[in-house]
Image (cartoon, rainbow, N blue to C red):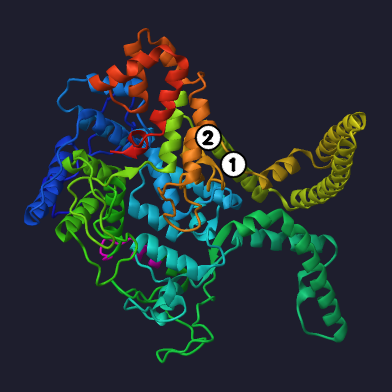
Amino acid sequence: MKNPLLPTRAIATVLTTVACLSLAPLADAKAFSQETVRSTSNEIDQLVAAYLQKSKVKANPVIDDATFMRRAYISIGGRIPTSEEAREFLTDTAKDKRKSLVDALVHSQGYQSQMFNFWADLLRLQTNDEKYGLGWHQWIRSAVENNMPYDQFVNEMLAAEGMAARNPAVGYYLRDRNMLLDNVSNTAQVFLGTQIGCAQCHDHPFDDLTQKQYFELAAFMGGTTYKSDAAEHLLRRLTTYTLKENGMELGDFRQGGDQKSRKKAMKNRGVAKKYARDYASLFKDFRRNATGTNASQQLRLPKDYQYNDGKPGEILTPKTYFGDAITNVAKDQRRKAFAGWVTSPSNPRFTKVIVNRLWAEVFGRGIVEPLDDWSETTRVSHPELLDYLCEVMKATDYDVQQFMRVLYHTRLFESAVASEQVKMGGSYDFRGPILRRMSAEEIHDSMLVLEFGNKDSSQNSSIQSQWQQYTQSTEKLFKMSLPELVALDEASDAQEKILYAARAENRKLKLAISKAKGAGEMDKVAKLERQLREGYRNMKRKMDSSGGNDMMAMMAMRNLRMRKAPMLRASEQPAPFRPGTFMRQFGASDRETSNASNQHASIPQALTLLNGKEIMTLTDGKGKLAREMRASATASQKLETLFLTIYGSMPTPAERERFEPLMGSPRQVQTLAKAMLNSKRFLFVQ
């Protein structure tokens, strides 16, 4: 239901048609009307202005078109504009071209890429962490593309259960598999802005939270299991079927009767376990990439619990420690009840935390800092503004895209950046956005623009195709008859023997090749390498003949892994980025903790920008920038192309006078381009 407190900001259900530059709006985008967006943005500006007036602080001036355009492209679309996009905007004479640009960017694929990076960093996404990571990557991408409401986005993850192949949102829990208490801490930090982790071991030293309250909150997830009930059920059916095929009845498992009957039962039980262990290899991926609920499984206080409000090992009843109390919840519904409590509009932290995070994403600093350390004594620099932003978020039905659109339409977003650094522990008056360096992902994606142009619509299709292959193989496995599963297991055993034997032989050949190279026996090396290649071909032929297409599909399914795609945007790369790579050098997150990325300068960064392969590739005369330079007829046009492409602005008269004489020498042009790419003007968002 829309918020009745905002009659002047009622949601319009019309589709906003936006056309600006080369960006096209999404066809199914839900939108505020232009009037609603602007009136809401204006109210935000008035609240900021009132605070500045009260503090006797003057607002920063509005920036020029070129600076605004570059800021908008980087902040909203995650990259610098192309030279064509920059020229078209700067030569546009429409009075509302800034508003049109914001609307176009918010509804662009570049925005989707930027927001995917935001969520992936916050949620600690690891794409290649088994099969669930691949599915969770795809699920988050789909949620951003379809603009899933934030409360639904969070609720679906917190309430998720089942196999990742059927419900990839379970990736949220599988990310912390078998680390339930750590997952609870992360949930509280990410979605409620509360750091409660130290209450795992003792009463919180700085917040009004006891260790028992922590475990009572965690008790909502106490029944969580990390296995597939569907796979367990099918495994039992398959084991029982095989026993019957070998003349063993289910009744043989029952204890009782004479000694002979009990011995027979024990023998049959041992046979059943052997079959189950053998068949388990078919289901190991599904059993690990799934969550479930065991209603009889409950959380207890630690055995070394030392406080007087509970006893060691005591079974706990789930209880929230702030906000609405939850009572009389069925044991198999506790996780869903917890998800509903976290995402409720009446939860005193849920809405505040996300609007504060998004405000910081747009303006460089939150109204509350740190972003994830809220408490009853939290100091809010702009309480009226925070309350109003919460009402806006609720009025949009937690539509993050439209909420961000409102923020990008403010005068504050058009204001000059702060010229001084905010003091540690101090509050910021928001005269303008915080000056910041581009993130690692933004630098990478901007380099792509210089080399290839607009790559927003290019996707790493391998992630979707591999995930589809995995889900299809999963469904095919669960639809097989029991005799087909027995045959598949036999084929699997046969192929594993072939594979292990081939690997052993290949290791011997590789060792022999290494020794022959060391001895300089190159003829022997060539002969051994031919044997190695023939060995791989023989292995494939044997595996094809031993198990058929079904088994090959299953083997491929187990080895799915998203590969790096360097010619695509950062959001299309597997996460996290490997240590030593360009994006890790520039501060990309290792995805071990939430929001672990940084923009700190380092010597490896300077060396990379001076002599790294990324810079050398950009200035080697083969990319888009080089082609545009060659297409420019005069020195003046060449300089304009260089400035529009790298800085998104036209050169000033002083810059023309200084740099146009260099345009006649390709070597000097290359040196100037490298210097521009190393400048703060390029690396920082002004």
Which mark is drawn over residue 312?
none
Residue at the spot 36% in from the left edge and 46% down from the top edge: 148
Secondary structure beneath dot 1 equals loop
- In the image, which residues are magenta? 337-348
166 up-or-down from 272: above or below: above
In the image, residue 341 lies in the stretch drawn in magenta: yes
Determine whether label 1 and label 2 are within 8 Å by CB. yes
Residue placed farthest to the bottom in the image? Answer: 308
What type is the residue that disc 1 sits on? Met
x and y percentages locating residue 174 in the rendered image: 54, 59
Q: Residues within 10 Å of mark 1 (few under 14, many from 20)?
A: many
What type is the residue that disc 2 sits on? Asn
Residue at the spot 44% in from the left edge and 28% down from the top edge: 674
347 up-or-down from 8: above or below: below
Q: Observer-nearest residue: 78 or 490?
A: 78
Q: Observer-nearest residue: 403 or 58?
A: 58
In this rendering, position of residue 38 left or right of residue 214: left
User: Residue at label 1?
Assistant: 562
Whether residue 625 appears in this view of the structure is no
Which mark is drawn over residue 460?
2
Secondary structure beneath dot 2 equals loop
In the image, residue 327 lies in the stretch drawn in magenta: no
667 up-or-down from 36: above or below: above
In this rendering, position of residue 34 left or right of residue 246: left
